[in-house]
Image: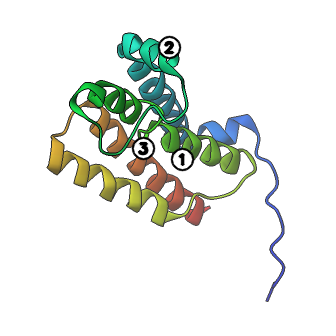
């Protein structure tokens, strides 16, 4: 019985591209970047106002009606789930590049989160992409267990 956790050996690009978790990581990374950047550009006038008024302490959790656009711009871009999704995608890609297996609970958690979002707000393109990320993570976990 081995008690020491030794690092996995890095995989070759050919093997890595066949891992569904790698594709899930790419989709998560791309989705996080897209959501964060596009939402920022969609509220460009509001971000200009935020920077004009002073960057620090501009957004509050209980905004007044005139500060609501600033709070909305914040919660749709850097305060959104786009940033954690970007970080999750990067972590999964790093993990698969080193030959590790993505745990099944991660895929199950992303799937459950996507279903909850879909039931509460509708199954739009972002929710469908999140469902796909979770399914790819689960497929990668299953593939890693079989090999």
Observer-side mark, 1 or 2, equals 2
Residue at left offset 41%, top offset 12% = 44
144 over 125 or under it: above or below: below
Which quarter of the rendering shows the C terminus?
Answer: bottom right
In the drawing, what numbered circle is on residue 21? 1
Residue at x 40% of width, y 50% of height? 134
Tell me, for residue 45, which label it has, or none: none
Query: Does any portion of residue 71 appear in the rendered image?
Result: yes
Q: Please, which colouring scheme is shown?
A: rainbow
Mark 3 or mark 2, which is nearer the start of the sequence?
Answer: 2
User: How far apart, in angstroms, are the residues tagged by discs 1 and 2?
Assistant: 42 Å
**Depth check: 140 or 93 in front?**
93
Which quarter shows the N terminus? bottom right
Question: Quick one: 136 or 32, which is closer to the camera?
Answer: 32
Q: Nearer the viewer, mark 2 or mark 3?
A: 2
Note whether 37 is above or below 27 in the view shown.
Answer: above
Q: Is residue 143 above or below residue 22?
A: below
Check disc 2 and report its element: helix, strand or loop: helix
Q: CA distance from mark 3 to mark 1?
A: 8 Å
**Dot 1: element:** helix
Per the image, label 3 sits on a secondary structure element best described as helix
For image coordinates 72% across by 44% down, the residue present is 97
Mark 1 and mark 2 lie on one chain; the one further toward the N terminus is 1
Mark found first going from the N terminus, 3 or 1: 1
Q: Residues within 10 Å of mark 2 (few under 14, many from 20)?
A: few
On the image, the x and y values in percent for residue 2 come to 81, 84
Q: Which residue is mark 3?
A: 133
* Residue neighbourhood size for the residue with mark 3, other residues' Cα within 10 Å, grouped as few (<14), some (14–19), many (≥20): many
**Mark number for residue 52?**
2
Q: Residue at x 51, y 27 (%)?
A: 33
């Amino acid at each position: 019985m081995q008690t020491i956790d030794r690092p996995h050996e890095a995989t070759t690009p050919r093997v890595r591209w066949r891992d569904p978790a790698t594709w899930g990581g790419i989709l998560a990374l791309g989705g996080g970047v897209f959501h964060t950047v596009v939402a920022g550009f969609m509220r460009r006038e509001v971000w200009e106002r935020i920077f004009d008024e002073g960057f620090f302490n501009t957004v509050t959790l209980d905004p007044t009606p005139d500060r609501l656009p600033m709070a909305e711009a914040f919660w749709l871009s850097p305060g959104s789930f786009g940033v954690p999704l970007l970080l999750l995608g990067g972590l999964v890609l790093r993990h698969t590049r080193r030959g590790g297996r993505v745990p099944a609970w991660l895929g199950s958690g992303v799937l459950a989160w996507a279903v909850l979002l879909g039931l509460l707000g509708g199954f739009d393109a972002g929710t469908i992409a999140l469902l796909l990320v979770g399914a790819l993570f689960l497929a990668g976990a299953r593939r890693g267990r079989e090999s």
